[in-house]
């Protein structure tokens, strides 16, 4: 299968490089009989897939473009439990349920009911483990660190253990008990996905959706300040009212609030307008924490992780402000260019250069600054840095949104882009060739294999996934 892209000049530099990253550089052969024939590694500096990376890469792009490899990677980060397979129960337990969201998306795109049945079981058992061990009933939330902060540089001083130079967040005892915005929104999304999987298998996902709703209510009650969402709660006793809400800006948490629909309408637009950007976009957490500064930005603090940028760009598109989306997309493309179209792991928020930021490291024997740590590397060819850009292309620009009934088509082409085409997207047995023309976000024409489709119900039906392999040509026109 050949994947081809045509479009705006800057995208024509960024997209082919992202496709090479995903399909050539980081799709690697298994290393023995216990591994799949091919899988997605996390990047040039990481030989393993990692649960978070495997899920994000499948969610953003791999399930659209290389579904067999995406599925192999999703399976690779699971393990046998006493009652069946579960998401690997490693030491980064707080957010591995993001796998559930990715597995549901994969099932929607492939139509593979055998995978769906297996994934629903994995999801249900894994969420049961999480709920039994990490759900704090008095808060109505899950405890544990933030999704994108496995390093202690991403936390305020009252979470850091004095004198402890370990970089790993869970080596600091108070980090076990914090309650974070992103982590709870991921759990809510996972429960919603589990409910949808149960329904698709003929079961009843009502209880799963109710759990998602309860989590959203707790997020609203405990994180919403009236103008923004806080980053994390630091418990100070048993009473939730006594917990300290850290009101730092967590970019991924805000992106998830928008993408899950927790924040919508005027609130979503206001959040987009209020969010702080550095010259090269949103940073992991703003402002500087601990002793970090512009000169020594924290690795999980005021640096740019491109996959978070991609999630944020998608979130702004979802909020419905086309001009704001265009501005964020422009910033993302500048970030990719500043990284030499090489998709580094982490980039400096002020220069765009590859920069792993600063963080403590107990085992380090080189140059070291007290209270700040050492300079960390930004690993090359990071897979999710590339899939983040591809996800913006597929979901936000081409506007392809998979659901139980099919793919909803809602393209958005901001000013400066008047034509995009991507061929080679997989939808079950079908291969999609999608072209969007015009500028704007109002769909005025949709044609599928030469047949006009009502723009009031712009759906590519789920039945396209079935039957013999075939090419499906989709042409959409938008205007303002």
Image (cartoon, rainbow, N blue to C red):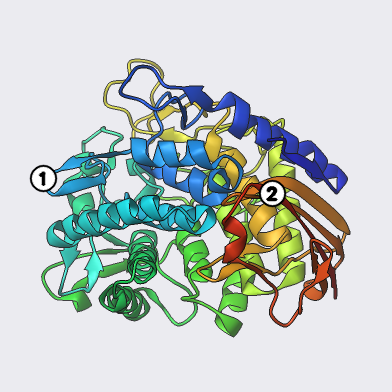
How packed is label 2: few (under 14 Cα within 10 Å), some, or many (20 or more)? Answer: some
Please say whether residue 321 is visible from this viewpoint: yes
Q: Of 62 and 291, which appears nearest the observer?
A: 62
Q: Residue furthest front?
A: 468
Q: Residue at x 49, y 79 (%)?
A: 227
Dot 1 and dot 2 residues touching (CB under 8 Å):
no
Please say whether residue 162 is visible from this viewpoint: no
Q: Residue 369 has which mark?
A: none
Q: Residue at x 37, y 64 (%)?
A: 197
Residue holding disc 2: 470
Q: Is residue 140 above or below residue 146?
A: below
Residue 1: x, y in percent? 68, 35
Q: Nearer the viewer, mark 1 or mark 2?
A: 2
Q: Of 327 and 448, which appears nearest the observer?
A: 448
**In this rendering, position of residue 453 left or right of residue 258:** right
Q: Is residue 137 above or below residue 395?
A: below
**In this rendering, position of residue 95 left or right of residue 58:** left
**In this rendering, position of residue 231 left or right of residue 336:** left
Q: Of 217 and 301, which appears nearest the observer?
A: 217
Q: Residue at x 18, y 60 (%)?
A: 128
Q: Looking at the rendering, in which quadrant would you find the C terminus?
A: bottom right
Q: Is residue 335 above or below residue 159?
A: above
How packed is label 1: few (under 14 Cα within 10 Å), some, or many (20 or more)? Answer: few
Q: Secondary structure at mark 1?
A: loop
**In this rendering, position of residue 137 left or right of residue 62:** left
Residue holding disc 1: 82
Residue 263: x, y in percent? 50, 77
Residue 221: x, y in percent? 33, 81
Q: Decide which of tag 1 and tag 2 comes sooner along the chain.
A: 1
The number of numbered discs placed on residues in the rendered structure image is 2
Q: Secondary structure at mark 2?
A: strand
């Amino acid at each position: 299968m050949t994947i081809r892209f045509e479009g705006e000049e800057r995208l024509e530099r960024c997209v082919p490089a992202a496709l090479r990253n995903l399909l050539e550089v980081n799709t690697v052969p298994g290393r023995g009989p216990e591994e799949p024939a091919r899988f997605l590694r996390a990047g040039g500096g990481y030989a393993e897939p990692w649960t978070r990376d495997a899920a994000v890469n499948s969610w953003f792009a791999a399930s659209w473009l290389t579904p067999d490899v995406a599925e192999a990677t999703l399976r690779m980060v699971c393990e046998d439990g006493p009652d069946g397979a579960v998401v690997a129960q490693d030491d980064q337990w707080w957010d591995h349920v993001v796998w559930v969201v990715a597995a549901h998306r994969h099932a929607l795109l492939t139509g593979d009911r055998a995978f769906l049945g297996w994934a629903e079981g994995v999801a249900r058992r894994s969420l049961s483990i999480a709920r039994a061990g990490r759900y704090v009933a008095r808060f109505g939330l899950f405890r544990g660190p933030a999704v994108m902060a496995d390093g202690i540089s991403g936390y305020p001083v009252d979470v850091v253990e004095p004198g402890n130079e370990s970089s790993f967040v869970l080596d600091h005892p108070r980090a076990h008990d914090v309650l974070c915005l992103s982590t709870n929104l991921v759990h809510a999304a996972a429960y919603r996905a589990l409910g949808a999987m149960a329904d698709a298998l003929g079961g009843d996902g009502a209880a799963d959706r109710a759990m998602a709703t309860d989590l959203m209510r707790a997020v609203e009650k405990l994180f919403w300040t009236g103008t923004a969402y806080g980053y994390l709660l630091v418990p100070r006793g048993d009473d939730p009212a006594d917990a300290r809400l850290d009101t730092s800006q967590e970019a991924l948490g805000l992106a998830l609030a928008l993408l899950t629909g927790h924040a919508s309408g005027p609130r979503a637009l206001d959040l987009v307008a209020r969010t702080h950007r550095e010259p090269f976009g949103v940073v992991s957490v703003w402002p500087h924490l601990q002793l970090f500064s512009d000169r020594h930005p924290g690795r999980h603090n005021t640096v740019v992780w491109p996959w978070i940028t991609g999630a944020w760009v998608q979130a702004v598109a979802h909020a419905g402000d086309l001009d704001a989306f265009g501005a964020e997309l422009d910033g993302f493309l500048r970030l990719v260019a500043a990284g030499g179209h090489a998709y580094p792991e982490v980039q400096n928020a002020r220069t765009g250069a590859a920069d792993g930021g600063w963080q403590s490291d107990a085992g380090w024997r080189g140059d070291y600054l007290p209270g700040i740590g050492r300079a960390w590397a930004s690993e090359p060819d990071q897979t999710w840095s590339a899939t983040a850009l591809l996800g913006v292309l597929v979901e936000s620009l081409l506007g392809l949104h998979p659901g139980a009934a099919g793919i909803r088509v809602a393209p958005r082409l901001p000013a400066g882009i008047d034509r995009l085409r991507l061929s080679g997207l997989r939808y079950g047995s079908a291969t999609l060739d999608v072209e969007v023309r015009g500028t704007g976000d109002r769909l005025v024409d949709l044609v599928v294999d030469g047949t006009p489709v009502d723009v009031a119900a712009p759906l590519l039906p789920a039945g396209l996934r079935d039957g013999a392999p075939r090419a499906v040509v989709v042409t959409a026109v938008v205007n303002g």
